[in-house]
Each structure stands twice: as C-alpha cells, then as structure tokens.
Amino acid sequence: DIYSIKSNLGCASIASRLAVALIIAYGLIAAFLYGLNLWYFSRIALAYSAVVIFSFMLAWRLGYYIICKYHEVPSRVLVIGAGSMGRFLCGILSTSNDYEIVGYLDDDDEKINMNIGSSKVIGRTSELLHLVETGNINEIVIAINEVKTLSLFRELINIKFSGIEVSGMLGFCE
C-alpha cells in the first residue's frame, strides 16, 4: 500500500516497510556476493549505499504521498436507490471530502428530480450505462435491498468488469 493514496500510512509505517524491503533486498545481495565469492567489494560501501537508498526512497515516497494527497480529487459516486438507504448514504458522505455524489437513480417516478442533500435523482436505472459513459463516474453504490431486474444486474456486472467500482451499501460503508 505504499503508493495507495487511500491508505492512511504514517511516516513510521512507510519507513518500517521500506526498511524491511531493503533488509531483504540487501540480504539477498549479500548472499549472492558470498555465493559467488565476490567479497572484494567493500562491505562498508554496501552499508553506505543501503543508507543512501533508504533515505532517498523514503523522501521520494513521502513526497509522492504528500503531493498526491494535496491534489486529491474526490471519487465521483453514483447511487442506485433514492429511498431510506440512499438518504442514509447521503448523510454519511456529506461529512467526507473523499466522495462526491453525482446523483441518484431510482425507478420510482415520484422521486425523479427530487433533491437528496446537495444532489438529486437524475434518472431511472435504465439510464445507468449512459450516465456511466458520460458522467465520469468512479464508483457505483447499490442502495436498494435487491436488484429487481435482470437487465440492471447485467449492466452492473459489465460496468464492474470495465473497471468501475460497484459495491453494495454494506461493502461501501465498510
């Protein structure tokens, strides 16, 4: 998870993971040099190079993490379901800067164009593929008890295989 922006690794955790990786790598290098009887290389030079590489790699990874966290764009979420579970999700995500609800999809005609928080019900579930293709969606959350139509289920499977995260309420909240 060293390059994962979503992970909350601290400086000590990054340094310890990097140290373990370098100890393993330099242990393999030392075993290789010993096995080939190439000890004419200075062991001190090997130790110095480990310290220099550790310092530069730690600075690089911390710099990468800080720069990416500073320029992080919220994940654009499309919610399927504008009922009680959809409103509950809105309450959870309204306190987070990591997610932006693009809108809700619901097949109940009374809910179309209804506002839920700062977003609204933008259409029916039959419009899912069109919205995913045009709406720059990063993630879909299913906030209904069950997927009632086979066509919606197939669309969700195809969307998941295209690389967009599709999750149920429980999985998303975890």
Image (spheres, grey):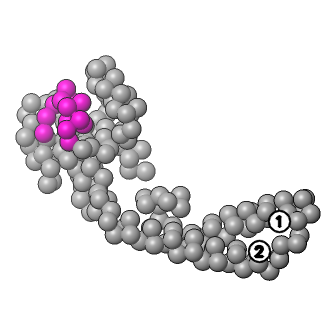
Q: Residue at x 89, y 70 (%)?
A: 39
* SS type, badge 2: helix
Residue at 19%, 26% (x, y): give it.
126
Say whether residue 96 is visible.
no
Rounded to the nearest angstrom, the CA distance separating label 2 from label 1 is: 9 Å
- Residue 89 magenta: no
Q: Residue furthest top?
A: 150
Q: Is residue 55 visible?
A: yes
Instruction: Give the mark nearer the N terminus: 2 vs 1.
Output: 1
Label 2 packing within 10 angstroms: few (<14), some (14-19), many (20+): few
Could you tell me the amino acid type at mark 1? Ala
Q: Which residue is mark 2?
A: 46
Q: Which residues are magenta?
A: 122-135
Name the foreground residue: 128 vs 81.
128
Name the residue at 40% across, 32% down. 161
Circle 1 sits on which residue?
Answer: 30
Q: Residue 13, percent across and down?
A: 58, 70
Left or right: 51 with respect to 133? right
Task: From the image, give the main secondary structure of the stretch colored magenta.
Answer: helix
Vertical relation: 90 (above or below) 163: below
**In this image, 93 relative to 11: left or right?**
left
Instruction: Give the quarter of the image for residue 42.
Output: bottom right
In the figure, 129 relative to 33: above or below? Answer: above
What is the crowding at mark 1: few (fewer than 14 residues within 10 Å), some, or many (at least 20)? some
Is residue 51 found left or right of 163 in the rendered image?
A: right
